[in-house]
Structure formats: structure tokens, C-alpha cells
Amino acid sequence: AQRVTQPEKLLSVFKGAPVELKCNYSYSGSPELFWYVQYSRQRLQLLLRHISRESIKGFTADLNKGETSFHLKKPFAQEEDSAMYYCALSPTGGGNKLTFGTGTQLKVEL
Amino acid sequence: NAGVTQTPKFQVLKTGQSMTLQCAQDMNHEYMSWYRQDPGMGLRLIHYSVGAGITDQGEVPNGYNVSRSTTEDFPLRLLSAAPSQTSVYFCASSYKRLPPSYEQYFGPGTRLTVT
């Protein structure tokens, strides 16, 4: 069975500081990895996926199969980045069934 | 488009009562699913459906039933509510396809308290 681990419940950084939200997974096949974000009083929404190799709102994430990690990074945190971030995994051929991590609350302080 | 809608937004039940959480989407998505969100546990998949008439169990299906009679609707039924079912419930939908998977769209959630 697959598992997603986000070791930090809360990450607090100052505005302008770099951000790294950690995500590790365990899965024997080739998964798809995603980051979903939930801003205050908004719906959970997709931030980015590893297969797109894109930068969204300044965030990037690289899939490291050797370390089974998919850490989310941003060089300079903004106040509007404060939110709950979830790492999620979809198994090989599993289509749309997501396994989520427990989430990390990011707080950007002025 | 309204996207994914859920009703009610809040609900309080007594132990043993039954109820149905409603979920609808207007994006013609084949795939729909229900998750529950509990503190410190993230979101866990309860049931999912890959199309009308087809449903399957997720990680935590006990105590819940689902059906999918139309593409648009995917109700979640609590047969006999228990305090352990106190949670926030999210419905999600997406197109169904082989990898890479499509983005899932989430509803606003239903906050359920069982006393």
C-alpha cells in the first residue's frame, strides 16, 4: 500500500525567506505526485503536479525517485502563501485515487 | 459552471441517526469521490465512482454507502451515525483517464458532528 508522509504539521517563515515543505512517499511502482493547497475559507485546489514540471505561484517541486521525495520549494515566501499544503500520490494506473499526506500549515510572518 | 457543490454545509446528528450528504458536479466528469478530513490525518478516501452505475470502496468505507445513478450526482449515505464519523467531508470530481491523471476539483465541504 502507498503512503505519503509530511513530517511538519506547521512551518513558520518570515516574508522573503525560502520555503521548503517536505514530502516523502512509499510506493513500489511509478506514482504521480501532486501538491494541493487550501487557502483560508477556500476549497482545496491543485497547486502543481510532478509530470508538468512547471512553476506555479513561484513554487516548484522535483520528484526524486532515489530519495522517494517530492519537496515543495519557493525561494522567497509571500504573505499570501500562508495556507495548508497537502502532498498527494496517485498510484500507477490508479487514475484518480489519491492518497494524501497529513498536511503542513505554512505561516508566513511579516 | 457551479463546479462541485455539496449540501448541507453543516450538520449535527445524534448517534444512530442516518443521513445523506449530497454532491453534484456540472462538468461532465466521469470520476467522483468522497474523502473525509480529520485533524492530523489528512484526507482519506471513503468511496469513489468511475462512472454512472459503478462504485468502489476506498481506504475507509465502513459505515458509508454510495450510489451513482447519474453522471452529475454522487450522494454519500451514513447508515447509523457514530461519533467516530465526526469529520469534514469533501466530494471531488475529475475526468477519468490513464496517467497522467487529471486535476481533481473539490467541493466546499460538509462539516458533520455526531453527538
Image: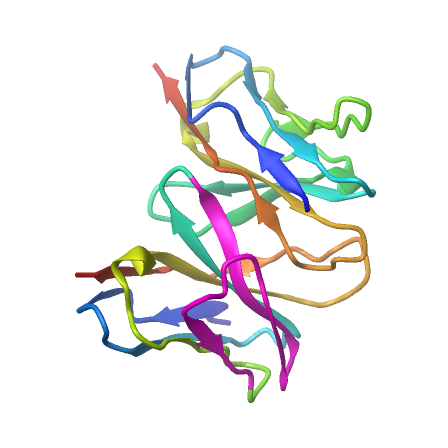
Scheme by which the image is coloured: rainbow
Vertical order, A83 against A41 (above or below):
above
- Tally the numbered discs: 0
Q: Residue at x 17, y 69 (%)?
A: B14
User: Which of the pair A1/B26 is nearer the observer?
Assistant: A1
Vertical order, B78 against A11 (above or below):
below
User: Which of the pair B30/B56 is nearer the observer?
Assistant: B56
Quadrant the C terminus of chain B occupies: bottom left
Residue B95, magenta (yes or no): no
User: Residue B94's x, y, as percent?
Assistant: 63, 65
Dividing the picture into quadrants, the one containing residue A26 is: top right
Specify whether residue A15 is in view.
yes
Dominant secondary structure (helix, strand or loop) of the stretch shown in magenta: strand
User: Residue B26's x, y, as percent?
Assistant: 54, 76
Dividing the picture into quadrants, the one containing residue B102 is: bottom right
User: Residue A71's x, y, as percent?
Assistant: 64, 25
Q: Which residues are magenta?
A: B41-68
